[in-house]
Image (tube, rainbow, N blue to C red):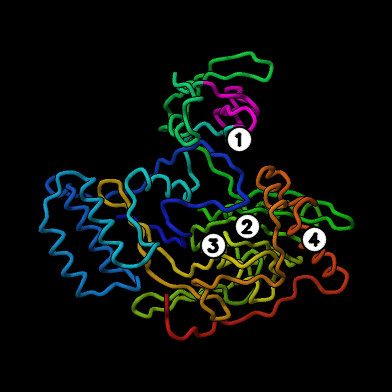
């Protein structure tokens, strides 16, 4: 059984993207290369899946309602039942997990597990387009095409309208249904009927391929006298640290005077990704401390591998969760960055995600984490140094036109630029007062 250490947001099978995400879908499919346990044919049954779930929870869970004696009794009840189908077993599993009182300990059917894995690995198989149902026309429309993707090779262009997918008329489908039709295994074909802006039409047969999903987007924004390196991190996938490193180095080559790191709407992801990224900004100091149910304590700290000491402002909001909060709190507590925006989501637990023998998955809470200050983030969040809220008009404008995010039309970004300007005029860049992790006292959920 393979497992992945995650710091998941909300419900691991939904991955809410946050208020400032564009209303579109990247059409890709994960084909996870995870090993599955060798199980005898007689054990490859719905009841075996129930027992696998029970074993994992029994050995790892730190859920507030977990009690070993009660869980042992539950096993007798679960295994005394007959399960005709996997769906029957899934219902019993979900019912058992609800008793733990932990929204982050979740069962994922095989389809949900594939979706979660695609978010965390960043290794995907698809055609490489982002699409939406256009608000004005109501037609499924290509928003953009990823460079070097099968879609680009086939000649798909932004603003192309997708009229049919493998013969199915998209006007009768939701965005999610269209996405499911376009997704598929690497090496297989999908057939699209496209209508261009000039009303010409063409039929394209596109072979799906593995694609690395970009979770880091960046560029230089010049506002007044400030030449700012703007980096937006969408989630902490397995490729996020590598992409962040490249972004910082590229922006340094552009001789930016400071950085704005945008974590708004970032739901979290891999714990180790957040630690690796923190080390790029911090030369020294504690990053995070995790505590498991046996009281085992693990410290993560900077290791003198920072690649910039330029001033940094971090943008956060109520949808910045989990791994985002680890990074934001570490940078704030070590006085490495100024936080701007609104209080973060407030999730202070870490999940381990296991693949079960039939391709389903189980996310189980295995530890709690504490920032350098020692304060619990769970249910509390991380408060910004400077609160800047968006009014309804500003929020709607950014939601409807995501290209305005990180520009002069974005009030929170403008505040960050103002802070960088003031720091450049009055302070030595990059000074930080490192903290050692402090004791958090009693563990509470």
**Camera-side residue: 198 or 122?**
198
Mark-to-mark CA distance, 4 and 3 = 23 Å
Residues in magenta, as a range? 134-163
Residue 146 in percent (x, y) is at 60, 35
Residue 179 in percent (x, y) is at 48, 34
- The label number, if any, that marks residue 24 in the structure image: none
- Tell me which label, 4 or 3, sits earlier in the chain: 3
Mark-to-mark CA distance, 3 and 2 = 9 Å
Mark-to-mark CA distance, 1 and 2 = 23 Å
Q: Are marks 1 and 2 in contact (CB under 8 Å)?
A: no
- Tell me which label, 3 or 1, sits earlier in the chain: 1
Judge whether 124 appears above or below 116 on screen: above
Mark-to-mark CA distance, 3 and 1 = 27 Å
Residue depicted at x 19% and y 75%: 69
Q: Quadrant of the C terminus?
A: bottom left
Q: Regarding mark 1 in the picture, which secondary structure is present there?
A: loop
Label 2: how many Cα within 10 Å (few below 14, some 14–19, many 20+): many
Location of mark 1 (residue): 146
Mark 1 or 2, closer to the camera? 2
Mark-to-mark CA distance, 4 and 1 = 30 Å
In the image, is residue 358 part of the stretch drawn in magenta?
no
Label 1: how many Cα within 10 Å (few below 14, some 14–19, many 20+): some
Location of mark 3 (residue): 321
Residue 273 in percent (x, y) is at 53, 60
- Tell me which label, 1 or 2, sits earlier in the chain: 1
- The label number, if any, that marks residue 264 in the structure image: 2
**Camera-side residue: 109 or 337?**
109
């Amino acid at each position: 059984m393979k497992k992945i250490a995650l710091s998941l947001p909300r419900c691991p099978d939904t991955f809410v993207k946050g208020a400032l995400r564009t209303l579109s879908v990247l059409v890709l499919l994960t084909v996870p290369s995870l090993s599955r346990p060798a199980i005898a044919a007689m054990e490859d049954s719905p009841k075996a899946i129930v027992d696998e779930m029970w074993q994992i929870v029994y050995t790892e869970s730190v859920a507030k309602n977990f009690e070993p004696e009660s869980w042992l009794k539950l096993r007798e009840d679960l295994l005394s039942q007959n399960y005709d189908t996997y769906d029957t077993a899934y219902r019993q599993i979900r019912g058992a997990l609800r008793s733990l009182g932990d929204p982050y300990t979740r069962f994922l059917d095989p389809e949900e597990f594939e979706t979660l894995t695609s978010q965390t690995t960043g290794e995907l198989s698809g055609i490489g387009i982002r699409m939406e149902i256009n608000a004005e026309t109501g037609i499924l429309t290509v928003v953009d095409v990823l460079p070097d993707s099968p879609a680009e090779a086939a000649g798909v262009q932004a603003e192309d309208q997708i009229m049919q997918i493998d013969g199915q008329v998209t006007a009768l489908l939701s965005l999610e249904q269209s996405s499911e039709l376009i997704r598929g295994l690497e090496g297989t074909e999908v057939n699209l009927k496209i209508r261009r802006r000039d009303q010409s039409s063409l039929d394209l047969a596109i072979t799906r391929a593995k694609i690395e999903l970009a979770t880091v987007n960046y560029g230089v924004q010049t506002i007044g006298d400030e030449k700012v390196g703007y980096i937006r991190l969408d989630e902490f996938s397995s490729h996020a640290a590598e992409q962040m490193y490249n972004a910082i180095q590229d922006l340094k080559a552009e001789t930016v005077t400071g950085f704005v790191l945008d974590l708004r709407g970032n739901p979290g992801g891999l714990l180790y990704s957040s630690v690796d990224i923190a080390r790029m900004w911090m030369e020294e100091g504690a990053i995070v401390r995790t505590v498991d149910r046996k009281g085992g304590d693990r410290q993560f700290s900077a290791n003198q591998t920072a690649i910039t000491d330029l001033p940094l402002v971090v943008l956060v909001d109520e949808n910045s969760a989990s791994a985002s909060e680890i990074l934001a709190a570490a940078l704030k507590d070590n006085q490495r960055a100024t936080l701007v925006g609104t209080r973060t989501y407030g999730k202070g637990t870490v999940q381990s995600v296991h693949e079960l023998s039939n391709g389903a998955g189980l996310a189980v809470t295995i530890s709690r984490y504490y920032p350098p200050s020692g304060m619990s983030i769970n249910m509390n969040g991380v408060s910004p140094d400077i609160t800047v809220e968006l009014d309804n008009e500003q929020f709607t404008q950014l939601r409807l036109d995501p290209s305005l995010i990180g520009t002069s039309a974005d009030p929170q970004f403008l505040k960050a630029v103002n802070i960088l300007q003031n720091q450049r005029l009055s302070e030595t860049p990059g000074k930080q007062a490192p903290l050692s992790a402090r004791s958090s006292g009693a563990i509470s959920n």
